[in-house]
Image: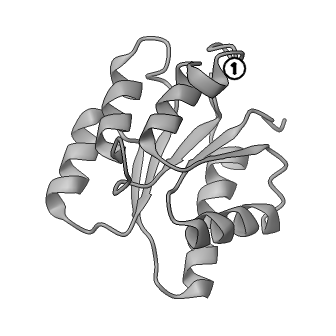
Amino acid sequence: MLNLKDILLVEDNPADARLTKIALEECKISNNIVHVKDGEEALDYIFCRGAFENRRISDLPLLVLLDLKMPKVDGIEVVRKIKSDEQTKSVPVIIFTSSQQDRDIRQCYVLGANSYIVKPLDFDDFSKAVNDIGSYWTFLNHVA
């Protein structure tokens, strides 16, 4: 059974956001993809604030695909806030970033990130990585 909850894409780079959306569409994911451009917007979406105040917090996204290095609020703080709140801590957070720093990887897992994937530089590899993420988290993984 398909779960048609939103996928929250948190990405400040327009080119990476566009490629990610294309790759998700190519793997036949029919979930709505909500794209926000920074961590502050991501937290507003998750916690139903600002432009998203009319959203119900019970309508949590199927998953959060999160870049780390962003303006306003970085991805590490977004993971921290999502995973430390009782209402949102079960939402899968997949880090999809260019950072290969051990410190970032360790910190994300300590905070509760579900996966950490370094963005491939090659277009085909990037598309395959996004396709694999989308296929696993929307078709194979089972959520309560």
Looking at the image, residue 92 sits to the left or right of residue 107; the answer is: right
- Give the residue displayed 84% in from the left and 60% down from the top: 28
Looking at the image, residue 88 sits to the left or right of residue 138; the answer is: left
**Any part of residue 69 in sight:** yes
Q: Quadrant of the N terminus?
A: top right
Q: Position of residue 48 (x, y in %)?
A: 59, 18
Q: Is residue 114 above or below residue 100?
A: above
Q: Position of residue 71 (x, y in %)?
A: 37, 51
Q: Which residue is mark 1?
A: 59
- Give the residue displayed 70% in from the left and 18% down from the top: 55
- Give the residue displayed 30% in from the left and 36% down from the top: 77
Q: Is residue 25 above or below residue 143?
A: below
**Any part of residue 60 in sight:** no
Based on the displayed image, in which of its 4 quarters is residue 96 positioned? bottom left
Q: Position of residue 126 (x, y in %)?
A: 56, 77
- Give the residue displayed 79% in from the left and 43% down from the top: 32
Looking at the image, residue 80 sits to the left or right of residue 127; the answer is: left
For label 1, count other residues whose C-alpha is less than 10 Å away and answer few (under 14), some (14-19) or many (20+).
few
Q: Position of residue 29 (x, y in %)?
A: 80, 53
Q: Is residue 59 above or below residue 4?
A: above
